[in-house]
Amino acid sequence: MQTWFRETSPESTVTAKLLADIIAGQQNSSPLRTGRGTVWARSTPSVKRSERAGKICNARLALKPDAASYQGQLGTLETFANEFERADSAYRDALRRNPDDYVALTGLGILKLKRGKTDAGLELFLRAEIIEPRYARVQVYKGIAYYQQRRVENALESLELASELDDRDPLPHIIKSMIYTDLLRGDEGIDEARKALDCLRFFVAMIIGHLPSR
């Protein structure tokens, strides 16, 4: 399980295809079985979109250099683009300015996970949770860290809390679906995949203007 989540595809469409395969009963075709695959989602932005988002963060930092939250977000973007050195620099700068920046702590924890340092990542997630217990993202990645440690029930509890904190985020359901598939609990895996697809449909509808943003 240590390799779980170290790599991320730049294409969020793979996630939708994966979920469709699971619902169609084609679990064996999934690259995310038995803890050996890789997480394809965050609904992860493409490289070009990451670059654009990074430019926005940099522009905001130019206007307000002391805004540590922007550094934390920039670090997270660099993490998912696998630009680990730049990510680490952004996190360190953010935390130097504000040691209680829970966004930067969470992002640095994600970076630790992607580098295979699960224990260090979990410690950072727990610190961020203490500072802001309502931050849904930290619960998602805390769940991933717990699962890498084979603490399945703790993982599922964290992911359930993430869904309660942000009921439109598909990622907790995607991860839970993967966990249930690993555990050969297919019905529960399919149920979570359906919930993830419902969340993805909401985002698509919101983007094209069929639903108001909340």
Image (cartoon, grey):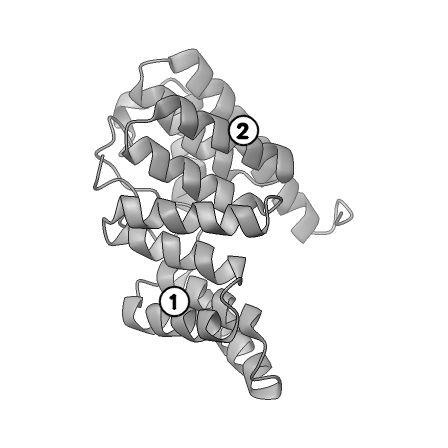
Residue 143 position in % (x across, y down) = 42, 35
Residue 203 position in % (x across, y down) = 62, 45
Judged left or right of residue 63, residue 45 is left
**Picture residue at 60% right of the left edge, 36% below the top:** 199
Dot 1: what SS?
A: helix
Q: Residues within 10 Å of mark 1 (few under 14, many from 20)?
A: many
- Residue 134 or residue 81, whichever sits in front: 134
Q: Quadrant of residue 15?
A: top left
- Residue 159 or residue 195, whichever sits in front: 159
Disc sitting over residue 78 in the figure: 1
- Residue 20 or residue 81, whichever sits in front: 81
Question: Which residue type does callout 2 highlight?
Answer: Glu
Residue 155 position in % (x across, y down) = 41, 29
Vertical placement of residue 1 versus 100, above or below: above
* Residue sticking out furthest to the bottom: 62
- List the residue tagged with mark 2: 160
| Number of numbered markers | 2
Q: Residues within 10 Å of mark 2 (few under 14, many from 20)?
A: some
